[in-house]
Amino acid sequence: MKTMETSLTAHSGKLIGSIERRLFLKQGLSLGALALLSGCDLTDDESVQKLLTGMSRWNDGAQAWLFNPNKLAPEFPESAITKPFPFNAFYSVDEVTLVDGKDYKLELDGLIRDKKPWTLPELYALPQTSQVTRHICVEGWSAIGKWSGVRFSDFLARIGADTKAKHIGFKCADDYYTSIDMATALHPQTLLTFRYADEILPPKYGFPMKLRIPTKLGFKNPKHIMSMFVTNEYPGGYWEDQGYNWFSGS
Amino acid sequence: MKTLQIVAVAAILAAGTWARAADAPGKPMKMDEPMHGEMKKKSMKKGDVRKAAEKKERDMKPRMDREQAGGAKK
């Protein structure tokens, strides 16, 4: 069995390299923002925050412009899977939210033609696909896992989502919330997943479903999704509203 | 001697069960406790996420209602 560290060593090469390049670019942009701040009173929190938020939103636009919807994230053999796959959240593993699968219904809102809620058996009956990809956390670690579910673009087409809208937001059972851009939602590797390692998602990995986006950082992969909505209004997200970059992807 | 062995095995099994139960999900979240993980600022508490989610809901709902009403008029 591979530990997280050995798996990292074996597979970190190109991807970590490209992430480092992106980080360098982002840090360069942040340096630019700091340079702009030289004329401001740093004790004026509100104006500093406003400027930094503006800079971050500009950064989102630049990343969205650079995003190649046809470029795939690396996939790995099952032998590369990190065991055990790490648990990570803003709470401890014993506080993981338990969702009752029997009564569960995925709620839909916003610019969607058919807002009928979806039960788990209905979702499980959709055509499923699997991927072994690397989850990269903004905290500085990464791990490889196998997720299975429905291609998100197929699901969006099925529910009649307005795919010309800008954002898709997610509300989760543990109160977490986030949102993503439509181009990433339509990326072929973005999956609405119901299984981890060929088993129904255990609570600690996000039962009943997790949006798996291998082109984005881990905090953009919401777990325990209870509802989703399509909108042109900017929905932000919990960490994003604390100053983390909204796009956070390649 | 045999009794001792039985007691030892029982104690090990009980400890294992307790350890698993301690890690089992589903305990109510302690909202006033500091957040876990490396993304947080020091002052952040687990309950902050719920408060922020409620505030976001209040902010987004009227905007989305207007958006959908506008779309329906077209």
Image (tube, coloured by chain):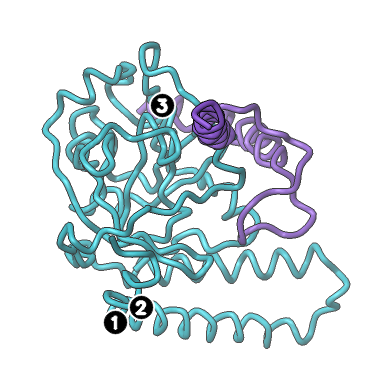
Chain colours: A cyan, B purple
Q: Between residues A119 and A84, which one lies in front from this camera angle? A: A84
Relative to A226, is A63 above or below? below
Depth check: give the residue in front, A2 or A176: A2
Residue A101, position as x, y percentages in the image: 37, 18
Label 3: which secondary element:
strand
Q: Looking at the picture, do discs 1 and 3 lie on one chain?
A: yes
Which residue is rendered at x = 44% and y = 54% of the image? Answer: A86
* Residues behind callouts 2 and 1 on a single chain: yes
Mark 1 or mark 3, which is nearer to you?
Answer: 1
Q: Residue furthest front?
A: B1
Residue drawn where x is 34% and y is 43% of the image: A211
Image disc number at residue A13: 1
- A91 left or right of A22? right
* Residue A46 spot, x, y in % from top left: 80, 62
Q: Is residue A118 visible?
A: yes
Q: CA distance from mark 2 to mark 1?
A: 6 Å
Give the quadrant of residue A194. top left
What is the distance, in whole Å, between disc 1 and disc 3 at their CAs? 41 Å
> Quick check: marks 3 and 2 in contact, CB under 8 Å?
no
Which chain's residue wears label 1? Answer: A
Say if A135 sits above or below A5 in the image: above
| Front-lying residue, A215 or A66 | A215
Mark closer to the chain start, 1 or 3? 1
Label number found at residue A109? 3
Question: In the drawing, what numbered circle is on residue A16?
Answer: 2
When the figure is inspected, residue A56 is found, relative to residue B64, above or below; the finding is: below
Of all chains, the one bearing label 2 is A
Question: Which quadrant is home to the C terminus of chain A?
Answer: bottom left
User: Is there a contact, CB below 8 Å, between mark 2 and mark 1?
Assistant: yes
What is the three-letter code of the residue carrying label 2?
Answer: Ile
